[in-house]
Image: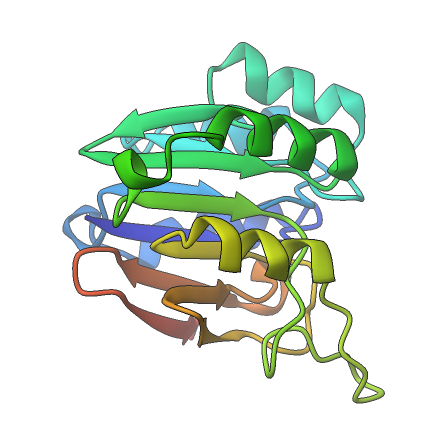
Amino acid sequence: MRVLHVSDIHCSIAMLERLFKSLSSTEYDLIAVTGDIECDSEAVEILKSQNKPVLFVPGNMDDIGVLKTFKQHEMSIDAEMREIGGFAFCGIGGLSFVSSLNTITSKLKGRKSELEGRLVVLSHFPPRAERVDVVTTGLHAGLKELRDFILEYRPLAFLHGHIHESPGSEVIGNTLVVNAGPLRKRCYAIVDLKLRVAENRLLK
């Protein structure tokens, strides 16, 4: 399964439209949106029009109205799990981070062996990392709680946004961690879950 991973749109609807005009629908099977959309109804309509499964978690800049709209369209997996194509996707949003993390952790208890090799996490915030959580000042802004989560539950992939300065990917434990970068600045990623590889791209 190939995932189109976008994040941090920040109401740049024109960039979202441009993205889908530039891509062939054969390049991806599912769309993962990891927060900071800010404009809800317009983004939802564009995403729906692609006729692909869409999974969403809110960012810290999204309000409850954005989350409500995505829930109404059955796109939100914040604090939820959903199975698609043999993979188990779970969401840890940035709107109520502690609550989302605690809820997902409780849902995963006792399921590690069952989910081995097919768990995929969508999170707005990054884990503490080597490269994908570095801000302009050089500091690491990733969260220790999320790194601990990765090392405990060993997801196949962990997709996030939030840190605009450090799009890219790295491996923590056995987990592929991907920062799509901000779509507002033309960044996105294609993640091949079967091959465990990510390609960060820049819209031309």
Rendered view: 142 above or below 148: below
Q: Quadrant of residue 161?
A: bottom right
Please state which of residues 199 and 91 is positioned toward the viewer in this rendering. 91
Left/right placement of residue 56 relative to residue 117 reads right
Residue at image coords 30%, 26%:
83
Which residue appears farthest toward the right when viewing the image? 137
- Between residue 22 and residue 149, name the one nearer to us: 149
Instruction: Name the residue at 73% across, 38% down.
Output: 38
Q: Is residue 131 left or right of 22 when viewed as pictured? A: right
Instruction: Name the residue furthest bottom.
Output: 138
- From where the camera sits, is residue 179 visible? yes
State the image coordinates of residue 34 (x, y, percent, origin top left). 56, 46
Above or below 110: residue 133: below
Answer whether residue 95 is visible to the viewer in this image.
no
Quadrant in the picture for the C terminus: bottom left
* Residue 196 x, y percent position in the rendering: 25, 65
x and y, in percent, of residue 177 in the image: 47, 65
In the rendered structure, the answer to whether residue 99 lies left or right of residue 112 reads: right
Q: Residue at x 29, y 40 (%)?
A: 113
